Image: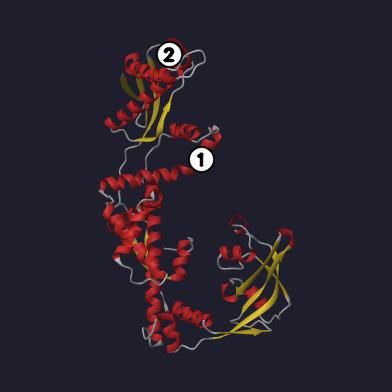
Amino acid sequence: MNITRNNVDALNAVVTVEVNKSDYADKVQAVLTNYRKTANIPGFRKGAVPMGLIQKQYGKAVLLDEVNKLLQESLNNYLVEEKLDILGNPLPKVTDDFNWDTDDFKFEFELGLAPEFAVDLSAKTNVVKYTVVADETMLNAQIARIQKQYGKVIAKDTVAEGNDVAGIFANEARGINNRTTLDLEDLADKKAVKAILGKKVGEVVTLNTKGLFKDDHKLMDVLNIGHDDVHGLAIDVTFTIDEVIGYEPAHLDQELFDRLFGPQTVTSVDEMKAKIKEDAERQFVQQADQKYLNDVTEFLVESTKFDLPAAFLKKWIQTNGENPIAAEEAEIEYERSEKGLRYQLIEGKIMKDHNLQITFDELKDYTGGLIKQQMAQFGQMNPTEEDIQGIVARVMTNQDEVRRLSEQVMNQKMLDLFKTKVKAKNKEVNYEDFVKAMYGELKH
């Protein structure tokens, strides 16, 4: 057997595998001999079928199978030995004049080669690293929500500020008919709030959906319509009020503090604010880190320039699935997946350059930490180490879970690396401005 490679260019190559009869003849003969021992052919005793008949009936199929096995093994070994970093899988070049009736064969495979490039983490960026603080306005709003949540519910006849309003949104032409409960503070349209205030149970208000809520996803929930239908929706809907819910706020006393935080953990409004601030900002760190990771990823994809073997990859996409697809579909799929492929290559390069690896012990420790958090949410505050490790062991037997957890660990390693290497502007904001930044509405 002889394997050679012709580099078409920096991103494409053709590997030629020459298979001689001596490479496969013994294996084919061994398989046919076993077939002869077990074949049941009318007119012949088992094991006494003439080899010529076995050859005629099974020879071609066995030849194809054994040559294919030989090809796969030799090609895979060649790629490993040559340390070729390929994209997709080798694609066989089909020729019309290929002949299985000869003794020696020549096969050609197209390869898409991974590009060589450098990743400059120290380059100047426009990335902002946010620190999100819980300001006084947010803390007071949170305390008001807690007082409302733990307060006394009072049925009302007329809508006033601070009330919730239950009713039915409807638009016959769009098939909308959904009962929901509104917190008037969620409404962004001041005219809509004014239209609802003062209305009584049974009255009907007509509202326009454009800009009705601060977040279109809230509109999706109250109208019970799909994600794709809600963005930019500007229609009139009726809202029939069938219940007005008032609240007598809960007192900010020790009984409430104990219900919220445990006995004597908090003993004053100031301590309550401090606890809420601490808990909120701990969650903000996770959200800010995720945005930072996403923004650095976006920057690296945009700023790290390299070519891909696009024509090869489109051809590979055409043939990679269970059923081949048209060239036009492959083009669309390539455009959809190109950005993700670029980041996979960039991430792999960063991992190699900075020796980012995951050990089994790291993965077990991370998994154990997640399990403790989950158990704490269900009130199991002090599980034994034996219990934790038993669950970890079961999780480690699930390859899908291991893959998912490994990605999370590597994301954390990438985040830690970016924080030390990437030049980002630090900015302290309140949560409202952070949400604006998430949606691209906040200027740097």
From this viewpoint, is residue 14 visible?
A: no
In front of the other: 13 or 166 = 166
Counting from the top left corner in percent of width and height, residue 419 is at 30, 59
Q: Is residue 102 above or below residue 296?
A: above
Secondary structure type for disc 1: helix
In front of the other: 366 or 238 = 366
Please identify the quadrant where the N terminus is shown. top left
Secondary structure type for disc 2: loop
Q: Is residue 136 left or right of residue 218?
A: left
Counting from the top left corner in percent of width and height, residue 173 is at 74, 59
Label 1 packing within 10 angstroms: few (<14), some (14-19), many (20+)? some
Residue found 35% across the figure and 53% down from its top: 396
Query: Which residue position is annotated with label 2?
Result: 48
In front of the other: 196 or 99 = 99
Residue 108 figure quarter: top left
Query: Which residue position is annotated with label 1?
Result: 333
Q: Is residue 435 above or below residue 315?
A: below
